[in-house]
Image: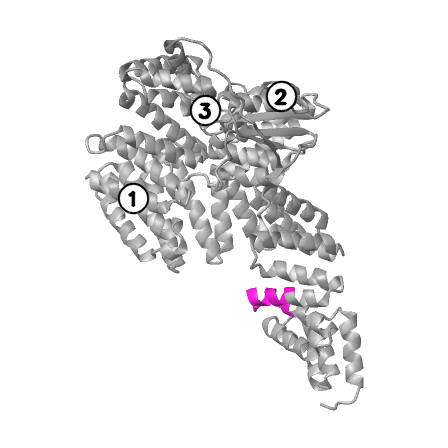
Amino acid sequence: MQQADPAPAAHLSVQGGTKRDRAAVVGSLPLPAPLLPPVDSHRRLRGPYTAAGTIARTLVPAVLALAPELVRRHDIELLSVAPELAAIVPNSRATLTSMALPAERTRFYARLRTRRIANGLVEFVRDALPVLGHQGARSLVVENAEHAETTDEEFLAALVRRVDPGVLTVVVCGADAPAADGPLAPALDQHTSGVPVSPAGAAPDPISPDEAAWRWVVTEGLLDGPDGEAARTAYEALPTVERAVLHDRRAAQLRESGEFSLTLGALPYHLERGSDAEAAAVAVLWSASDHCLVNGFYTAVADYGRRGQRLVNGRENTAQWWKFGVQLGLALSMLGRTKEAEAVYDEARLLSTDPAVHMACAYSTAMLYTRHNDPADRDEKKAKALLNGAIATASLLHDRVEQAFQSAFYKNGRALVEVNLGDPQEALRLVTECIDDLDRRLTPDEHRLHRSVLKNNRARVYAGLGRLDEALADYAVVIEQDPNHAEHYLERGNLLRRLGRGEEALADYSRALSLSPPFPEIYYNRGDLRLTEGDVAGALADFSYVIEQDPQFVDAYVNRAGIHLEAGNTAAALADARTGLRFDDDNAYLHTAVGQALAEKGELGEAEAAYDRAVKADPTLVSALSGRAAVRYEAGNRREALDDLCRAVELAPKDAALRYNRAFLYQEDGRRQEALDDLELAAVLDPEDEEIAAALAASRGGPDTA
């Protein structure tokens, strides 16, 4: 973090001291008028999106009255972070995933969904400012940032990165820096100016021990400074039973408020310390975990799962312990913490003899070995063996619906393994068998989500087999059944593009974007298609927006650098390529872009070095070889240039330009027949190229000395 006197238009990071100390420092700064009162982001208050939810609940009513279309455009984000807004904000884009009953959930949101929500919220806040009549700059103070939940960290990181501090000055406060491995710390380092805090000594308020203890509880144990120390001391001096009574009292107050988000933070905190923790807290923790699982808040799910299991005796109440375990294991898997996830499943096997538990553990462990583990730790054969066991057990179930569903669920998992083992035909057989079996044995309204998932998976297998028309037919069905699920349109758009149906693909990409919070991958795909279709301005806008959302999206830098090079803007191309290389220093395309930009600036030595790095990273990259050949030729190294072109032609024998360039070098080397051969083939490959035609005519008219 840059330590400096804060400029009037700069986001700020205020670290150190107590909350009161930081408030004094903030009060002394020449900040614009506040957008709203200071926001506390401590996850103990409201769990995920404690800060973002507070901002949304404050701004939405006024924005809804003035610009309802802005609220509708961001309804997914707003309802995700502030469930209480459902009373005034209708959910216009529900999906089978969001509506599924707990027993029927077989698809969950991607881990990156919260990052998309963060970007959507940032855009809502930014666009709300003029709607609310804030023509001048405003400020927003956020406290306890080092204790923010991961979702709020992502939101605050996007806020300081994407919002102009001259429009909204964000002041991020905390006693300490956020965790170095989280999303917020690097954003503060790069996008804020640091403001030091000098602790100010103060005596605690002169109140009785009973008042002090209650103050500790009523502030959710977050009071700091001398008052906090005195309050905690008084609280800890009480007998356990009396402390529990205070927590019960506070929990009752929170319940009376009726605010759902409190059940994700302060309420479970107090119930865990109340008179009957297992009876009261377990139910609330379970509800919080379930809510967060449905919304893809996986760090929170892992936290609730651990806390819930600590309150439940796994030997005496295995069923409740496993309810937390299912969600805990899934969350850990989605977060890439696969060793922890496998330990949950291993412990469940030790605790339970329930066939349902063992089937679920077999499936979940198999998914670790075929999908979630690092590639070096995957084992497809072990995954297949585990799934075969689950399929065998499922065949013994007596309930009609459960037997059909579980069998299809585990066979679908094995289909993924078969794809990874290189047998897509067997995967297709399995998925089709599942679809037919469920259609035969279930009513149309039973397990709608999983039946949609099966058809989606079959469409993917069809696409992998090149059976694109059949894949499109399955996508048509799933889109009809689940019309608000953005990924269906993304995947079908990719297929339509493969079929050369660019206009339809663009329509699907645009539809997907209308159904989702900002989704960088879809904007990238649309930009790539726009570039292919000749819409350079549209492509440039899409790639730029991708980078704005995700500054580490390397492929967007590759494509945008290429656009800049085509436009002759070498400085912009060089900047993009070098920025992208900070995130992927072995990217051959970016090294090639650097080489081309430097070559156009006449810096041939550095350009050749860049091309060398590109060829080392990917010896088959034709653009790097041909670019290096041009630089070497300009530097007088004709033999090496010819070697590069020969290798490039081997890799791309139907590239007319490469053959034309090699013919030129052959002619200089006196190898006229080889030059003629290249030119004749180049003319066949590109009969409209006048330069090639002229060179061929000249070559045919000259003496043959080969």
Disc 1 or disc 2, which is closer to the eye?
Answer: 2
User: Label 2: how many residues lie within 10 Å, few (<14), some (14-19) or many (20+)?
Assistant: few
Q: At 76% from the left edge and 78% from the top edge, which residue is drawn?
A: 696
Amino acid identity at mark 1: Ala
Separation of disc 3 and disc 2 at Cα? 26 Å
Upstream in sequence: badge 1 or badge 2: 2
Can you say which quadrant of the picture contains the C terminus? bottom right
Residue labelled with disc 2: 27
User: Which region of the structure is painted magenta?
Assistant: 610-625
The x, y position of residue 19, in whole percent, is 52, 23
Q: Nearer the viewer, residue 698 or 255?
A: 255
Give the left or right position of residue 169, taking residue 494 as reference. right
Secondary structure type for disc 2: helix
Label 1: which residue? 343
Q: Mark 3 = which residue?
A: 46
Tell me the CA gap for discs 1 and 2.
Answer: 49 Å
- Hey, what amino acid is under mark 2? Gly
Residue 65 position within the rendered picture, expressed as x and y whole percent measured from the top left: 63, 18
40 up-or-down from 442: above or below: above
Secondary structure of the residue carrying tag 3 is: helix
Callout 3: 10 Å neighbours few (<14), some, many (20+)? many
> Which is nearer the N-term, disc 3 or disc 2?
2
x then y, percent, for residue 134: 70, 22
Q: Are marks 3 and 2 in contact (CB under 8 Å)?
A: no
